[in-house]
Image: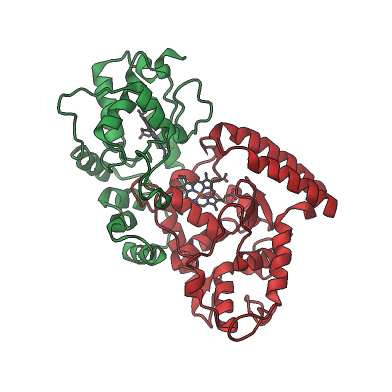
Chain colours: A green, B red
Amino acid sequence: MRITIAILALSFAAMPAPAQKKVDPARADTAIKAAFPTAPADWASRLTGDETMQQCSASHNNPAKDVAAAIQKREQGTIVYPPDNNFMGDWQKGERLAQSGYGLRFTDYPPRQANGGNCYACHQLTKNEVSYGTLGPSLSEYGKLRDFKPEAVKAAYEKLYNSHMAFPCSTMPRFGANKILTIEQIKDAVALLMSPESPVNTGK
Amino acid sequence: MKRSLVMLAVAFAAVAAIPRAHAQDAETEKAIEKYRAMLREDPWSNPGYLDADRGEALWTTRAGPKNASFEQCDLGKGPGKVDGAFAELPRYFADADRVMDLETRLLWCRETLQGLSAADYVKRPHPAGGQPVKEIGAIATYVASKSSGQKFAARLDRPQEQDAVALGETLFYRRSGPFDFACATCHAQSGLRIRLQGLPYLAEKKEASKVIGEWPAYRVSNTHVMTMQHRLLDCYWQMRMPELQMGSDASVALIAFLTKQAEDGEIAVPGLKR
């Protein structure tokens, strides 16, 4: 995991620096609001974004140390843990939600099924699914590589609930904090990563 | 030309029939590479030329309450001048006091010359899958194809244009929506893909200049021509954002930024895309 972070830090560092000409954030807000006139009233927050998003946008995902620390603290505070501290659900359900990209698009209303996590869009997971994206690191054998340790199970839950806690300005969605997935669904995804029976770890 | 068009139509239909399942993307990609090779042999066989032809006819057709054609439309090089006009867009237009990309300018000409409401047009500006590109899109395909072979030469140095490019860059990195996505989430690194779809690194000039000059493009998976305004709406759809309004300042700013990124790129319209 450290290595991944180091590599990602490098690739972020290689991103072009913000242009000389500064655009007032209020101006960008105005332009975005005007560009989406059909937005339903309860979508207002989709247009502006919260403080963490604003800080990550402004720094091109490369926040200064103190900003990164503030983001980490703020995002950690959003995490809701399962009442019984059991972080693992059903890996088979986890595999289904990892495959599904359904949810929250304007064509997805009224909802016809549960939201998906679309993990395969960005990650390699099971060996059998060859159609995976590379925006995120491979998660193949994720649990096995961590000896299925309970701390790693909890860390995976936290990562999925709020990706910025472990990695400020992560480009992975905050599945729990943004209510994309329910706590039960996050547990299912954790099982897909961390259960010894999961094909992510058995290689089957 | 006719015969290869028919052959391509058959070939495209076969690709379109492939289920959109992701596992098939690699095959689709291979098939498209084959068509690209055919196109290199006979560039005129791109089905997008049918829409360019339709656009050319629409350009000279009188319509609307003012019963006028587009022939007096000034795309920046003077009324009615089409050759090379796309290569200099987006640009600031004093008559509208706005920076405009090609589609936005055409929408403006349609309203001012023909008296047809732009507000009505933008309610449904883009075709559904399998439907032909709409009027402005067809005309945009025609106009842009008349700059094919040229390099982008948009000045983008007037204050209003610089402002649009800067706003576009800001929006490119701006996260919004419940997935926290920005354009930069998917287009700020080289060689990455989402599922099996390759993602162009648009924050970098080299890759941007390869792809931006290919729009409007015939999009095989939708079996219709897609314009740049439509492409951006589709990317915002993936970002879980509402429908991007065609001609909005934000859309023009993003196109100005992308065009700046592609400034050394060659125009090859209609392009051909997955």
Q: Nearer the viewer, residue B196 or B119?
A: B119
B251 over B25 or under it: above or below: below
Residue B133 lies, in percent from the top left, at 62, 60
Front residue of this view, candidates B92 and B233: B233
Q: Residue at x 26, y 30 (%)?
A: A184
Specify the quadrant that holds the N terminus of chain A: top left
**In this view of the protein, can residue A107 be seen by the observer?**
yes
Residue at the farthest bottom position: B66
Q: Quadrant of residue B241?
A: bottom left
Question: Which residue is found at the position 53% from the left and 30% from the top?
Answer: A131
Which of the pair A114/A117 is nearer the observer? A114
Give the x, y percent position of residue B116: 55, 79
Total labels drawn:
0
Q: Is residue A169 above or below residue B228?
A: above
Q: Is residue A165 above or below residue A151?
A: below
Q: Residue at x 68, y 60 (%)?
A: B151
**A175 relative to B183 in the view: left or right:** left
Q: Is residue A196 left or right of residue A123?
A: left
**Residue A75 % position (x, y):** 23, 40
Q: Position of residue A156 (x, y in %)?
A: 30, 26
Could you tell whether B157 is left or right of B70 in the image? left
